[in-house]
Image (cartoon, helix red, strand yellow):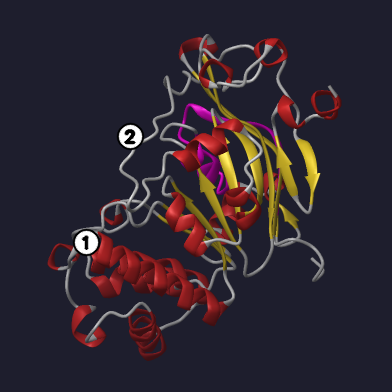
Amino acid sequence: MTTADPLLQVTDLQAYFHGFKGRRVVQAVDGVSFTLNAGETMGLVGESGCSKTTTCHALFRLLPGAGQIVGGSIRFNGEELMEKTPREMQQIRGRDMAMILQDPMASLDPLFTIFDQVAEPAYYHRRLRRKTLRRRVVDLLTSVRIPSPEIRMGEYPHQMSGGMRQRIVGAMALAGEPKLIVADEPTTNLDVTIQLQYLNLLRDIQKETGVALIFVTHNLGIVAKMCDKVAVMYAGKIVEQGDVRDIYNAPQHPYTEALLKSIPKIGDKSELYVIPGQPPNLAELPTGCYFHPRCPSAFDQCRSEMPPDFVLGHGRTARCWLVSNEVRSG
């Protein structure tokens, strides 16, 4: 990998879930492509059920039994992850790329102390032992603003508040010194004050370590605060992506525009905008553009033909016929 190469380059990633005897196929991740540079933060946004989390699990090759990556490329740190064996992927997970899950109790074992759980990645991936390992755990807990780390690391997850548990999970993710961290809605279960503290903490950690970050969320306010660029997902596809400011100031896809219109505004007493309809069933997708049944700007081509990714320049793309040259010239 050269300095000019992106840290992560995902190209046409496809991950499907197959039902009984393969009769029902759910196209959970359908042709997803994006790049992420070292030290950069990307927001992955969209409604619940649009496959944000499944996309991240596919990056780690951690899909459940019925799930399978059926196509595409995942190049990370100059290597093709699709060519790695399961044993090689075990070495990469935790050491080079790590994930912070939405519910910290899904990552923490109630039967083991905080020390045991934070120490395990450092022990396994960095071969730290005894006093060196203990110092590393203290340093990690200190870095995520855990008070009295020497005392806290002897306690158990149930003795921690929700915000503290989320910080512990962050320390576990940092223990292997990864180049990439995927944070899957890590602030959902936290109150607003603790959310702000945790977001500032992630920012400080990123500045100190230079780690790249994928922030999965449905909260567009968090994306505006945290991210350099954003990818908007709908029904397993990225429908628009680019620089955060560009997309927030001038969205090119009707779904992105609808999401931004749905954000409550302080002092605005008008009725809150709601996107009509529901996201489609991924096993029974509509023809053409998947958003057309809910789109106020849809026309005949939208209903019959899936739009490609139109390149708008400066790393920005939109999957919508409204931005095509044919529509513009018409």
Quarter occupied by residue 299? top right
Q: Which residues are magenta?
A: 51-75
User: Quick one: label 2, few (<14), some, or many (20+) residues within 10 Å?
Assistant: few
* Structural distance between the alpha carbons of marks 1 and 2: 33 Å
Q: Quadrant of the N terminus?
A: bottom right
**Residue at the (43%, 31%) spot, across then down:** 49
Find disc 1 in the rendering and name its residue: 162
Q: Is residue 52 magenta?
A: yes
Above or below, comparing residue 310 to residue 138 in the picture:
above
Pick the front one: 274 or 278: 274
- Quadrant of the image occupied by residue 8: bottom right
Quarter of the image where the C terminus is located? top right
Residue 294: x %, y % from top left: 51, 20
In the displayed structure, does residue 173 sit left or right of residue 77?
left
- Report which residue position mark 2 lands on: 271
Q: Residue at x 42, y 19 (%)?
A: 277
Residue type at the position of mark 1: Gly
Query: Who is closer to the viewer here, 127 or 60?
Result: 60
Q: How far across and how far down the image is residue 257, in percent?
A: 55, 37
Q: Position of residue 231 (x, y in %)?
A: 60, 46
Query: For numbered disc 1, what is the local secondary structure?
Result: helix
Identified by mark 2, the residue type is: Glu
Q: Secondary structure at mark 2?
A: loop
Answer whether residue 164 is magenta in the image: no
Q: Viewed as shown, does residue 219 lie left or right of 295?
A: left
Q: Residues within 10 Å of mark 1 (few under 14, many from 20)?
A: some
Q: Earlier in the sequence, mark 1 or mark 2?
A: 1
